[in-house]
Amino acid sequence: MSYCVNCGVELQKSEPRCPLCGTDVLNPNEMPEEKPIRPYPAHVEHLDKKVDQRYIASFISLLLLIPLFTTMLANIFVSKQLTWSYLVLGGELVAFTVFLLPMITRMPRVLYAAIDAVAIGVLLLLIRILTQSNWNWLLLLGLPITALSVLMCWFFSTMSSPKCRIPVLIRFSFALACVGLLVVAIEFLIGLYLNAIAWPTWSLYVLFPCLVLASSLLLLNRRARVKEEIRKRFYF
């Protein structure tokens, strides 16, 4: 048995070079074989992670049927009809579309965002029907905030994609600015729902720091030296 002179890894007799660092094996006490037998296969088989994720997501989806059917049966036994168990159905629908659906199938990000928006809209509609409230909070508050949030999530996923060629610091600055604008839009929608539309107040406490941080990141992006140091520190 011999060892690599460069990295010290233990070598098999049939190894012409170190499998770890590639250094040629020079051992005068071991005669080289004409046709060395490789101690490990030439090709390493890798498990398909996507298949594993699809299997796990499908298994979890089946497990979600247990609490769904349990709550529905309990609802029927107690109330003699299906009422509040619809909320469990809506919640599991949202959980499935947001977390499990991307693991099961491959679709464009826009389609994922649209499906998530529909699932959340169905949940809000079930809440409105079961609570027998008016339509104002759903049409003026729930659905618009949901649409803006889903749109922002789609924007964040697009910006974080490896295919995005925009510098990382600029992406972060855009994200911070969008968060601040989202909070301002939420305050506007709340004022529209309460019939008290006015100049933004509390949302400015979020918007102003976000804009300052976004501007700082844009300035850092202009300094190549600082940008390179940040890339090394955070492995961008």
Image (cartoon, rainbow, N blue to C red):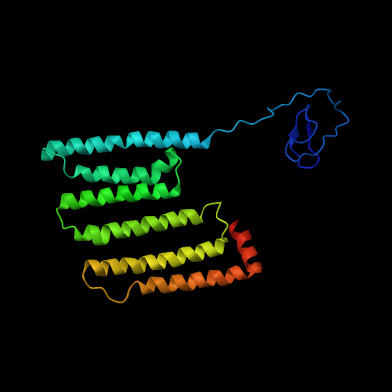
Q: Nearer the viewer, residue 134 or 63?
A: 134
Residue 95: percent from left, percent from top: 34, 45
Image: 93 above or below 227: above
Q: Horizontally, is 150 left or right of 39 in the view?
A: left
Residue 129: percent from left, percent from top: 17, 50
Residue 16: percent from left, percent from top: 80, 31
Based on the displayed image, in which of its 4 quarters is residue 5 positioned? top right
Q: Horizontally, is 145 left or right of 75 in the view?
A: right
Residue drawn at point x = 40 percent, y = 68 percent: 180
Q: Spot the residue most to the left.
A: 80
Residue drawn at point x = 58 percent, y = 33 percent: 46
Based on the displayed image, in which of its 4 quarters is residue 187 positioned? bottom left
Based on the displayed image, in which of its 4 quarters is residue 210 positioned? bottom left
Residue drawn at point x = 83 percent, y = 24 percent: 33
Q: Horizontally, is 74 left or right of 186 in the view?
A: left
Q: Nearer the viewer, residue 186 or 32?
A: 186
Residue 27: percent from left, percent from top: 85, 32
Residue drawn at point x = 34 percent, y = 33 percent: 62
Tally the marks. Answer: 0
Q: Spot the residue most to the right.
A: 28
Q: Nearer the viewer, residue 198 or 169?
A: 198
Image: 135 above or below 102: below
Q: Quadrant of the C terminus?
A: bottom right
Q: Quadrant of the N terminus?
A: top right
